[in-house]
Image (tube, rainbow, N blue to C red):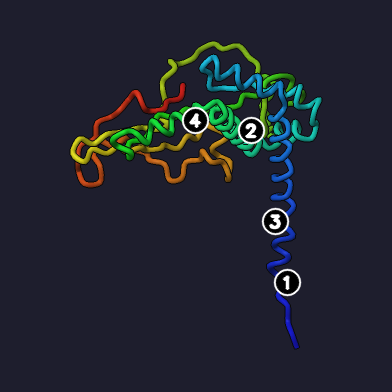
Amino acid sequence: MQMIDTSGAADNQVANPASLQKEVFKQRVTEFMSKTAFRKDIKSMLGKQGQRLNVSIDDLRRQDPDLAKYVTKNPIDAVSMFEGELDRTIKEMLDDSGKGVNSEKQAANTNDKAFPTKTKRFYINFEGNFGRNHVTPRGLKANLVNQLVSVRGIVTRMGLVKPMIQTSVHYCEATKKGEIRHYDDNTNLAEMGADNPNKSTGGSEHFPVKDKDGNTLTHEYGYCLYKDS
């Protein structure tokens, strides 16, 4: 008599709808960002040396109401999807224009291939009418937990804007090699996404001054990546 274990199948049936939903919305994000008008906005951002792209929630709601609702209800996954697609689109644009190829050739021609090259991070910002999710500071209730909200109020006091380190680059004179360290950013929604390529895994907490062998490291501040905090 043959016995069939269906416990695993039952687990898959429970897990598949959520993962299938994410894949569907990933495809919708790709379709939305592949439009000609959107690519023009990306080119304009790159031309201005910007790092943050504004996405109108109103335009998104007119073209894909379900995706707009998903953004407000699941901001961690949604922001991760949009920023991942933004990175891929920019990479394609740079490769098509030849800049990506030239940068790779320059990196290959350097004497120290282990020394990391300076990179740039790009972010997504949603703007427009958030409907019920547009509130005052007193309107931040428990029913909005884990949702994307737009808060309007009067700023009465604020601290100084300080640079928060995201990636540090170091050089060791003894070994003639470069070293790079990533730091977790708990304020970035995109890095909270489970499948986001920019998510730090086991990010460092301490700024290194020596390598694993005890050699002194020189900090290359011009190559480090910062974020206003």
Residue tagged 3: 15
> Disc number at residue 82?
2
Count the marks: how many?
4
x, y percentage for residue 149? 67, 26
Q: Earlier in the sequence, mark 2 or mark 3?
A: 3
Label 4 amino acid? Gly
- Residue at image coords 34%, 34%: 109
**Is 31 on the left or on the right of 189, as rendered?**
right
Q: Earlier in the sequence, mark 1 or mark 4?
A: 1
Label 1 amino acid? Thr
- Residue at image coords 20%, 36%: 216
Residue tagged 1: 6
Mark 3 surroundings within 10 Å by alpha-carbon count, few (fewer than 14), some (14 through 19), many (20 or more) = few
Residue closer to the observer: 149 or 124: 124
User: Which of label 2 and label 1 is nearer to you?
Assistant: 2
Instruction: Please identify the quadrant where the N terminus is shown.
Output: bottom right
Mark 2 surroundings within 10 Å by alpha-carbon count, few (fewer than 14), some (14 through 19), many (20 or more) = many
- Residue at image coords 74%, 85%: 2
Mark 4 surroundings within 10 Å by alpha-carbon count, few (fewer than 14), some (14 through 19), many (20 or more) = some
Q: Is residue 185 above or below residue 131?
A: below
Q: Secondary structure at mark 3?
A: helix
Q: Earlier in the sequence, mark 3 or mark 1?
A: 1
User: Which of label 2 and label 3 is nearer to you?
Assistant: 2
Q: Earlier in the sequence, mark 3 or mark 4?
A: 3
